[in-house]
Each structure stands twice: as structure tokens, then as C-alpha cells.
Image (tube, grey):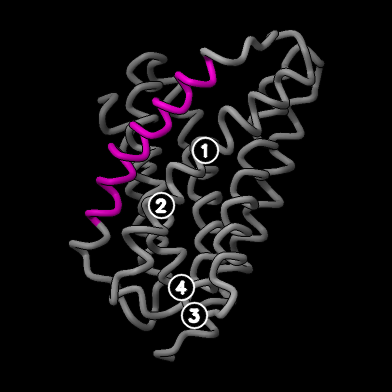
Amino acid sequence: MNLLLLALAPIVVVIVYIYNKDIYEKEPKILLFYNFILGAFVSVIITTIISIIYNYILVLNDGSVLHQFIRAFLVVGLTEEFSKYVIVRYFAQPNKAFNEPFDGIMYAVMVSMGFAATENLFYVFQGGITSGITRAFTAVPAHAMFGILMGYFMGKAKFSKHKIRYNLIGLCLAMCFHGSYDFFLFIDFIPGIWAGAFISLILGFWLSIKAIKNHQEKSYFK
């Protein structure tokens, strides 16, 4: 099986799914592409730089639950979601094409899928077919879910007097779900604890479905 296809196929599936959920007023494809590219390169660069700083400052013990909590929520969750947030906040959100709440979900998912594409290529080419199949049903949908939850509130923020509040709620929610997902996987030295990651995914997917429906119903173009 072609590893490149295996790595990118789930990314395409997510993008097509979310794009089709944007029922009433489609976003310019070129702008969606730009957000994807920024996610694939700029967000990854931001994440890499911050991670290098963390690795220099923090010395984390793989066998410590507290240290793995810090790694999951701060080193990974906050860093990766912040790197995506920056693109949505300062590139997508100010654009005139961002003209209804659902656009927050659309652009946040595009940035997230750009990030996920770069990450997935790395892991799949390193880990092979098994890694690619596993990530197609876990990590890639998880990144989409983080993007939907962040984008839901960033979509609300664009048309609210409480812009800063909603933007930060979106960032914090994505970070919390990302952190909780990774945390349960990081503490694999506790038997069966990995199930917590899937519970957080299921809850996140349920909230994501509700978020999509809510913004569809409140579309200004309905």
C-alpha cells in the first residue's frame, strides 16, 4: 500500500466531510487551501520552536503521572492548539470571507488538517502501514475534533462583543480535549488506562456534531 496515500487519505476524507457540512455559503477554495498550507508549515514550525524551548527548560520523567500530565496538556496540547489558533485568529478570522459562525469550524479544521497532514506523513513513513491505519481512525479524526471545537467558539467570537473571551474558550477547549486524549495514552504504564483516550474522543465527537448542527442552524445565509 502506498504510504503517502495512506497518510493523506484520512485528511482528504475529513476535509470533504466538513466542506459538505458548510451548506449555505461555501468558502473560497483558494482561501481554504491557504489555511491548510499555513497549518501544514507555519503551525508545525511554531510547534517545533516552542517544543524545543520546553525540552530545554523541562525535564520530564516518563514514569511520572504528574510529568505526563504536564507533557500532555502543556507541552503537546497547548502548544499544538496554540499554533493552529494563531493562524485562525490572525489570518482566517479577519478575512471578509469569514462571514458566518460556521466559518470558524471550516477554517479551524483546514488549519488542523494541514497540521495533521504533516504530522501524519512523519508518523506513517516512520511506523508503516499499521501506524497509518491506526492514525486514520484515531489521531486524524482527533485533530479534526479539536479544530471543530476551537472553530465553534472562534466562529461565535467573530460576531460577538466578547471576541477575546470566545476565542480563548475555543483555544482552551481544544487544548483540554487534546491534552486529555494524549494524557491517557502517555500513562500506558497503568494497565487499561488507554480507554480514557477513547472516552474523551467519543465525548469530543458528540460535542463536535452538536457544534456543527448549531452553527448550521444559525447560518446568516439560511
How far apart marks 3 and 1 lie (CA) works out to 34 Å
**What distance separates the C-alpha of mark 4 from that of mark 1?**
24 Å
Residue at image mark 4 = 102
Locate residue 76 relative to residue 72 in the image: left or right: left
* Residue type marked 4: Phe
Look at label 3 and name its amino acid.
Answer: Phe
Residue at 81%, 16% in the rendered image: 191
Give the secondary structure at mark 1.
Answer: loop
Q: CA distance from mark 2 to mark 1?
A: 11 Å
Which residue lies under the disc numbered 2? Answer: 14
Front residue of this view, candidates 206 and 143: 143
Question: How far separated are the C-alphas under marks 4 and 3?
Answer: 11 Å
The answer to whether the residue labelled 4 contacts the one labelled 1, judged by CB atoms less than 8 Å apart, is no
Task: Decide: few, some or many residues near mark 1? Use Cα within 10 Å; few <14, some 14-19, many ≥20.
Answer: few
Decide: marks 4, 3 in contact (CB < 8 A)? no
Residue marked by disc 3: 159
Labelled pair 2, 3 in contact (Cβ < 8 Å): no
What is the secondary structure assignment of the residue under circle 4? helix
Secondary structure character of the magenta stretch overall? helix
